[in-house]
Image (cartoon, rainbow, N blue to C red):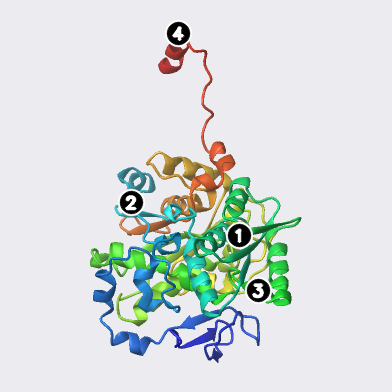
Amino acid sequence: MKKFHAYCCSICQTIFEPQDIFYTCPHDGGNVDILLDYESLKKQPLINQITTSHDFSIWRYLPLLPVADPGYEKTPLHSVGWTPVYESPVLSLQAGLKQLWIKDDGRNPTASYKDRASAIVVARAGEVKADVVVTASTGNAGAALAGMAAAIGSKAIIFAPKTAPQAKIAQLLVFGAQVILVDGNYDQAFDLSVTASQEFGWYCRNTGYNPFTAEGKKTAAFEIWEQILLSHSEISNNLCVFVSVGDGNIISGIHKGFKDLKELGLIPAVPRIFGIQSEGSSAIANAFDAKTEEIEPVQAITLADSISVDLPRDGLRAVRAATQTGGAFIKVSDQEILAAIGKLGKVGIFSEPAGATAFAGVLKASAAGIIEGSDPVVCMITGSGLKDVKAAMQAVPPAPIIEPSMAALQKIIQN
């Protein structure tokens, strides 16, 4: 039995019946949304079902997911999500905010937000009896797929640019995925993986292509609702959510999650959503600034490799996540990203550049008056700093080297 009602194209709004294998709209290539059977769901005691669950992972939201429970309870597949939310007076003061929460998705099994999408896609692959799942990735999506596939003993094939950080490539290999490094950028790896999936009949996980990826990524919205909004109902109408953006699928997924909650009457309004992009990879922010939904490709150059994308594959829905909620897109420099890594680290949060991009955006938005000090803010950290140690070392001064003597030590301590 299908757990979702239909697919809907984000461009032409055509409704498609549920199908086993379905990617983008056959009419115009638009990304499609998965529509749940909201009328049936409204008849269920959802709050009680969810809040009394003892499964502290994305699977506690099974009634709101388009796949059945995949099983594998004692594996990393059932450890995805329910990531911690931190409150830091130090970061709040630096940002000039009264209420700031940091949600750390670097605590997922493979240390990034992408585990949410991969867990759902792997579950879906099982439903459609796919033997192989393939994706293109700069590292995190591939590691997430490799890890989730390894958890259930299935095969994953990852196409990655040869320039991807070595720590991320190491994850892919350790998880047992077949890794193919492409002498090109992410967009070229993406196109090759799609062609290969069509040629060999592999199930394609690609972000902004497979509609089930956004269904995994929307689960962070459910957690924000349960971890913050249920106990702070007074902020429901003015919460601001900050998300780093590359291809646009995380921000569009979070938007979808809040829209699901609003449709079901579980929240009174969708929060304002802010997308943060590196100045060197700002195709979606450029479209937002131009007040258009047409995404023009850029030549992406940024140290935040996880959000370095020439042509975002989910750009239209990403723009709408900001425009439809009263949010905005903000550009930050690589230097601002490095500074944000250091600020987060000083309160015990180790973020890769893409994750710290969101906090850099919080600082910039507050300083520019885009948000007010009284606005409650949630900032998503999408990946662990262990993913890119080279970038982390650029964010801090080097450690001193001294002779093994007290005299040398005293000089360091005095300074």
**Camera-nearest label, 3 or 1:** 3
**Residue behind mark 2:** 86
Q: Label for residue 202?
A: 3
Contact check, label 3 and label 1, Cβ < 8 Å: no
Between disc 4 and disc 3, whose residue precedes?
A: 3
Q: Label for residue 282?
A: 1
Between disc 1 and disc 2, whose residue precedes?
A: 2
Q: Nearer the viewer, residue 167 or 252?
A: 167
Helix, strand or loop under label 2 = strand
Q: Nearer the viewer, residue 346 or 223?
A: 223
Helix, strand or loop under label 1 = loop
Q: Label 1 to label 4, Cα distance in Å?
A: 51 Å
Helix, strand or loop under label 4 = helix
Could you tell me the amino acid type at mark 3?
Trp
Q: Label 3 to label 1, Cα distance in Å?
A: 31 Å
**Residue behind mark 4:** 407
Between disc 3 and disc 1, whose residue precedes?
A: 3
Side of 231 where 240 appears, left or right: right
**Camera-nearest label, 4 or 3:** 3
Q: Quadrant of residue 38?
A: bottom left
**Camera-nearest label, 1 or 4:** 4
Residue extending farthest to the front is: 153
Q: Nearer the viewer, residue 155 or 231?
A: 155
Residue 395: where, in percent of width, then height?
Answer: 53, 38
Q: Nearer the viewer, residue 348 or 55?
A: 55
**Camera-nearest label, 1 or 2:** 2
Helix, strand or loop under label 3 = loop
Image quarter in which the N terminus is found? bottom left
**Camera-nearest label, 3 or 2:** 3
